[in-house]
């Protein structure tokens, strides 16, 4: 049986296998561990920072140990909580709330037609986006840790045993399943699959980025983001545990104990560039740049065409910083104390900050109109605007 680490982006991760080496590895990134390096103090802001305000906020149930990310469809925001609450919110007002009838472990995936969440027992639950009415329930082989991806072609679900399923959007019937051999040790992945063109993209243990045929799940090409190396099982963990980022024909991914790499989808997945950088947090692309948060909480701005460094912001070390989000000239990240930090897109300097409810912001901010949308582990859902 494979032994797997919980996501290293989560403070206080649980371990399977009982290995002291693994415990030390997690302690090093857990800011609340007595043996961990202390997290950076809250950085001071200059007098000329931009105005940040809360456009609206709404309280929902707590996330517990799960990673719930809001889904934005037009003006609607769909969120979920661990106890089974699924919500539709518009302009800060709850339009409907339903009880899934069981505890949830992942969500939310949504389009204009449906909202989809997952459970720790492998359940996949779909609800009508307009009314909240239950549509169907399906089953995969293991716990669902990542938000399902929803499109007109189906619902793509990643199970905890690193299988990818495509379910029929009409009734949840299985269309196909893809699986890869598991290494002896891997990071427990919360990297959701991503639809693009004729493919479903997903990252896997061993540093492989896979393009799967939407028609039948067959692998079309694979990109090597990292190569496992070292003498111990822990040394050889080199897993992609965050979703890939896609813009145009360019797709980029980053691996824990590996690299960040970009590939050209139009050229059969040929590599454009790669560079050493370890991350279990994730990355985002915009028209010119790539932004990524490493395992120490350092945020980087890179040239998306070459991978060359533009800037790095290292004053958030060990604050369990999320993957970035970018809108206009601002990059946003959340942290373990519930702060959302706003950085200059061009220079990486701090341009603003907002504190949510004080509980950890563990999922990347989403874009909602002119605002950044956050969901804290304590259940604070909030649209934040920086001017």
Image (cartoon, rainbow, N blue to C red):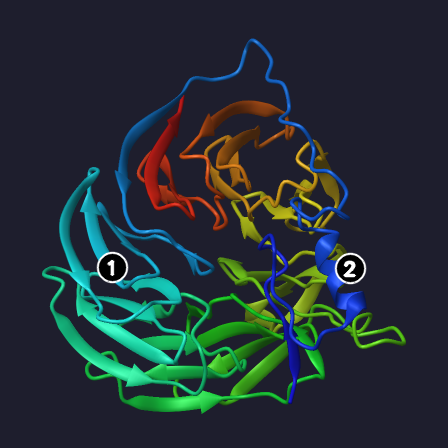
Instruction: Quickly name the residue at label 1.
Output: 85
Q: Residue at x 20, y 47 (%)?
A: 89
Q: Position of residue 248 (x, y in %)?
A: 49, 58
Quadrant assignment for the N terminus: bottom right
Q: Earlier in the sequence, mark 1 or mark 2?
A: 2
Q: Give the secondary structure at mark 1.
A: strand
223 sits left or right of 242 in the view:
right
Q: Position of residue 367 (x, y in %)?
A: 38, 43
Q: Position of residue 274 (x, y in %)?
A: 74, 59
Q: Position of residue 79 (x, y in %)?
A: 29, 54
233 sits left or right of 221 in the view:
right
Which quadrant of the structure image shows residue 134?
bottom left
The number of numbered discs placed on residues in the rendered structure image is: 2
Q: Which mark is residue 238?
A: none
30 sits left or right of 275 in the view:
left
Q: Residue at x 11, y 68 (%)?
A: 133
Query: Looking at the image, which is closer to me, 305 or 122?
Result: 122
Instruction: Quickly name the residue at label 2.
Output: 24
């Amino acid at each position: 049986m494979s032994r797997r680490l919980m996501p290293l982006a989560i403070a206080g991760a649980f371990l399977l296998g009982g290995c002291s080496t693994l415990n030390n590895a997690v302690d090093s990134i857990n800011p609340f561990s007595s043996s961990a390096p202390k997290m950076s103090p809250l950085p001071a802001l200059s007098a000329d920072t931009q105005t940040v305000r809360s456009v609206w906020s709404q309280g929902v149930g707590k996330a517990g140990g799960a990673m719930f990310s809001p889904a934005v469809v037009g003006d609607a925001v769909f969120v979920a909580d661990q106890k089974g609450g699924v919500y539709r919110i518009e302009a800060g007002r709850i339009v409907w709330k339903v009880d899934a009838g069981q505890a949830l472990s992942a969500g939310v995936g949504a389009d204009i037609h449906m909202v989809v969440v997952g459970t720790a027992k492998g359940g996949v639950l779909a609800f009508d986006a307009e009314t909240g009415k239950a549509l169907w329930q399906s089953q995969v082989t293991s716990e669902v840790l990542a938000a399902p991806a929803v499109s007109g072609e189906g619902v793509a679900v990643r199970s905890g045993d690193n299988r990818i399923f495509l379910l029929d959007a009409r009734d949840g019937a299985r269309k196909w399943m893809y699986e890869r051999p598991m290494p002896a040790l891997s990071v427990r992945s919360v990297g959701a699959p991503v639809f693009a063109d004729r493919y479903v993209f997903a990252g896997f243990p061993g540093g492989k980025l896979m393009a799967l045929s939407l028609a039948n799940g067959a692998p079309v090409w694979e990109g090597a983001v990292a190569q496992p190396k070292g003498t111990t099982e822990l040394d050889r963990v080199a897993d992609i545990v965050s979703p890939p980022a896609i813009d145009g024909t360019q797709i980029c991914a980053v691996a824990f104990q590996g690299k960040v790499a970009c590939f050209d989808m139009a050229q059969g997945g040929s590599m454009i560039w790669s560079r050493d950088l370890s991350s279990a947090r994730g990355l985002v692309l915009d028209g010119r740049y790539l932004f990524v948060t490493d395992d120490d909480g350092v945020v980087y701005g890179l040239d998306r065409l070459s991978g060359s460094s533009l800037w790095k912001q290292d004053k958030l070390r060990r604050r369990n910083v999320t993957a970035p989000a970018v809108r206009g000239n601002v990059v946003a990240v959340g942290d373990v104390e519930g702060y959302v930090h706003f950085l200059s897109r061009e220079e990486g300097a701090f341009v603003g900050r907002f504190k949510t409810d004080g509980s950890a912001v563990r999922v990347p901010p989403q874009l909602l109109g002119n605002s950044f949308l956050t969901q804290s582990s304590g259940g604070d859902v909030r649209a934040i605007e920086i001017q």
